Image (cartoon, rainbow, N blue to C red):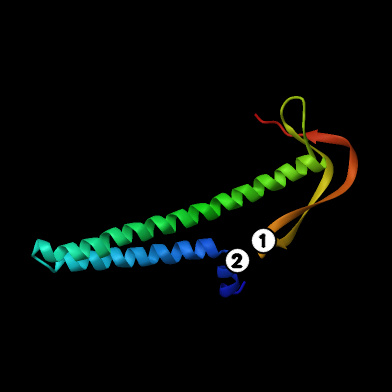
Amino acid sequence: MDLINLAKKQWDRSAGLVFTGIGVIALIGGWIGVRGTPVLAEQTRYIVSGGIGAIFLLGLGATLWISADLRDEWRKLDRIEQSLGDGVLRWAADGAAETIVDVTLAQAVRNGEPGTTITAGQPRAATTASSNA
């Protein structure tokens, strides 16, 4: 896949990586500035710009990355909820999920992001239950 298209589709992860990289560079630059200055009053500007700015950028990058992971988990939960609502899956009496129709997974793109659509096949007479043990 083209790197530009991947960065557009995964914009939050891309921005997280960029902010984290800039934060690391700012942290290293602040450390170099403080290391080379013996006077405490001159070190303050490096601590403020390099240290505090870097911590903010690292936090922003981590937040964007976690947000992208949470969005992926919500998509998975939405697919499971839709499968349960459409009757593709149902809960058995023993608490295990059981498939009542054949399910074929096909790749699709929704809103510019990869996803999975569920296409139901022919209903089966016998169902198989998976155990939670």
Of 99 and 12, the residue lying toward us? 12
Which residue is denoted by mark 1 in the rendering?
114
Q: Residue at x 48, y 65 (%)?
A: 15
| Amino acid marked by disc 2 | Lys
Q: On the image, which quarter does residue 107 sit in?
A: bottom right
Q: On the image, which quarter does residue 86 sit in?
A: top right
Q: On the image, which quarter does residue 115 sit in?
A: bottom right
Q: Quadrant of the C terminus?
A: top right
| Amino acid marked by disc 1 | Pro
Q: Residue at x 72, y 42 (%)?
A: 81
Q: Residue at x 35, y 63 (%)?
A: 23
Q: Which tag, 1 or 2, sits closer to the chain's start?
A: 2
CA neighbours of label 2 inside 10 A, class few (<14), some (14 to 19), many (20+): some
Of 125 and 31, the residue lying toward us? 31
CA neighbours of label 1 inside 10 A, class few (<14), some (14 to 19), many (20+): few
Q: Is residue 121 above or below residue 58?
A: above
Side of 62 where 50 appears, left or right: left
Q: Find residue 40 and name its label.
A: none
Side of 10 where 98 appears, left or right: right
Helix or strand or loop: what does disc 1 sit on? strand
Q: Find residue 9 and name its label.
A: 2
Mark-to-mark CA distance, 1 and 2 = 8 Å
Image x and y of residue 24, in percent: 33, 63
The reply to whether discs 1 and 2 touch (Cβ–Cβ < 8 Å) is yes
Q: Quadrant of the N terminus?
A: bottom right
Report the residue that reaches farthest toward the left: 39
Side of 80 where 29 appears, left or right: left
Image x and y of residue 8, in percent: 58, 69
Image x and y of residue 79, in percent: 71, 47
Q: Residue at x 70, y 61 (%)?
A: 110
